[in-house]
Image: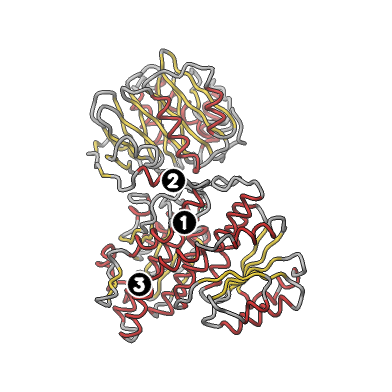
Amino acid sequence: MCGIVAYIGNKEAYPILIKGLHRLEYRGYDSAGIALLNGGLSVHKTKGKVSVLEEHMKDFDKSGTIGIAHTRWATHGEPNTQNAHPHYSFSRKIAIIHNGIIENYSTLKKELINRGYEFHSDTDTEVLVNLIEDIQTKEEVNLEEAVRIALNQVIGAYAIVILSQEHPDMLIAARKGSPLVIGIGENDFYLASDATPIIEYTKNVVYLDDEEVAILKRGSELKIKTIKNEEKTPYIQELEWNLNELEKGGFDHFMLKEIYEQPTSIRDSFRGRLHPDKGTVSLGGIIDYEQKILNADRIIIAACGTSWHAGLVGEYLLEEIARIPVEVEYASEFRYRNPIITENDVMIAISQSGETADTLAAIELAKEKGATVLGICNVVGSSIARATDAGVYTHAGPEIGVASTKAFTAQVTVLTLMALRFAQLKGTLPKSEYVRLLHEMELIPEKVKKVLDDNGLIEEIAGKFKDSRNFLYLGRGYNFPVALEGALKLKEISYIHAEGYPAAEMKHGPIALIDKDMPVVFIAPNIGIYEKVVSNIQEVKARNGVVIAIVTEGDTTVKNMADYTIEIPETEEMFVPLLATIPLQKLSYHIAVMRGCNVDQPRNLAKSVTVE
Ligand code: G6P
């Protein structure tokens, strides 16, 4: 939610800020703005994407070596120019950018109005900057202290950067609940919501912790204090991702590039962990917690969106292979329903970004009740990675397309490894079968590659159905979550209504929708309860439904019934989601492109949801 980027140093700030905003645009894109200090403090804002701001800036002075910039995903106030960031303080001497929500903003706003402040936007952010200014004047303190005092008064989440006309050599930044990374350059500092705008300038970064304030002065060392004024020593880490991973690399869209990266991202997620020749799986990140997991009453998986779907696949895997009871929870529901959690529970929180507010809150709740909390995250050093007791990173690399693709299959890969590791420790599978599964897993990236090579078949199917108004996705067992994920992908990027359902549940409602205009996508590999799925396909055909089926290579039964079939290579049932998901991602992608939709930045969505 919202992208923050800021710079202070000896280079021109504007090109760094604009490029940074483009890199962060996936976080929110309903308006954008920039503040530069060059003599006076100037703020420029526009509704819409960063390119609109860039166009607008053509007529203005863009010089200056210090600046802050923002791309917004609206929470308080509609997406328009007034509500875009940065926001000036009342005197127009201070400008602020903010990601997060100030929950007590209306009380603070009333007090400030009573003290003569006027507001030009509907945002909570403008309240915060005026609160800082008010404290500075009223209490006659310096800006740094005023920021600290103000942050002690606000309730909610924030990542902020402040630029003041009276301090041309200083930026002040702070965070609570919303991420903020500081890049340490040769003679300069870069600030951003995540490392993507920083990576091309420096690999040395400091992740600000909750309730920490950073003071970035030109020509000085980075200073960090808590909002209670305690000094902290900055912990400098090295970034692992590189610039190539952030570019489109010849693909039309990030989403397509990320779909095609899956053979690599799946392999990277099991590399060094899967040892078929030794007949073992090792997960260094959670080794100290293995006994705890084996003794646990149950595993609670908490996640949101696509990560929740990965969690559902995890439930099938962990219960079937490792024989550990699993419950999968929407983090947003779990946190508010007074769930029963004990010290004998282990939570696995799954999150690509590692910043999802509801997932973080579910983790805090589980920790409070004494449960052990493990994480499966893609972003190293993210809030969730740091809030959990231990975890296993997915090595999918940066995912820029808002609709998650390679992160999903990487999450499923890690969950598969977990299930296999726990199965090994518990001895739930005969050795020969176990080793066979490990060998099969090693082949999955090659099989994914084969699925990606579809000779244009999926594009052709997309062309036939691009104007459909509804889609139904059906699967059973491991493929029920795949159906949910397929439907989610389609609605996210093409805006076609789509529902995922367990195939047999279709009879209890969705069957009423079936007619000749209703494409029904079946995930029907020739394994598990295949015959039952075949019956479900017959039920749809009997009602003139149009069937698109994902089938195992060489299948003839379904091929004779379905209108279109897409083949995936044969594999063990537990690995089918890693293959069957791929054609569904491609189908959504091509339909969205044909409908002229913005695939990488679909309307109303954001990549990382840092508000509840
Ligand atoms: C947003 C994104 C989804 C993602 C979900 C959970 O809704 O648009 O793609 O699945 O958040 O995000 P997380 O980073 O926690 O996996």
Residue at image location 61% in from the left, 32% down from the top: 80
User: Residue at label 2?
Assistant: 249
Q: Which mark is residue 344?
A: 3
Q: Are marks 1 and 2 in contact (CB under 8 Å)?
A: no
Badge 3 amino acid: Asn
Residue 37, percent from left and from top: 41, 19
Query: What residue would you read off at disc 1?
Result: 260
Q: Is mark 2 within 8 Å of ligand 1?
A: no
Residue 301 horizontal/vertical position (percent):
44, 66
Q: CA distance from mark 1 to mark 2?
A: 11 Å
Q: Does dot 3 land on a helix, a strand or a loop?
A: loop
Decide: marks 1, 3 in contact (CB < 8 A)? Answer: no
Q: Position of residue 565 (x, y in %)?
A: 61, 71
**Residue 406 position (above or below residue 569):** above
Within 10 Å of disc 3 (Cα), the crowding (few <14, some 14-19, many 20+) is some
Distance Cα–Cα, label 1 vs label 3: 41 Å
- Describe residue 237's horizontal placement relative to residue 115 as left or right: left
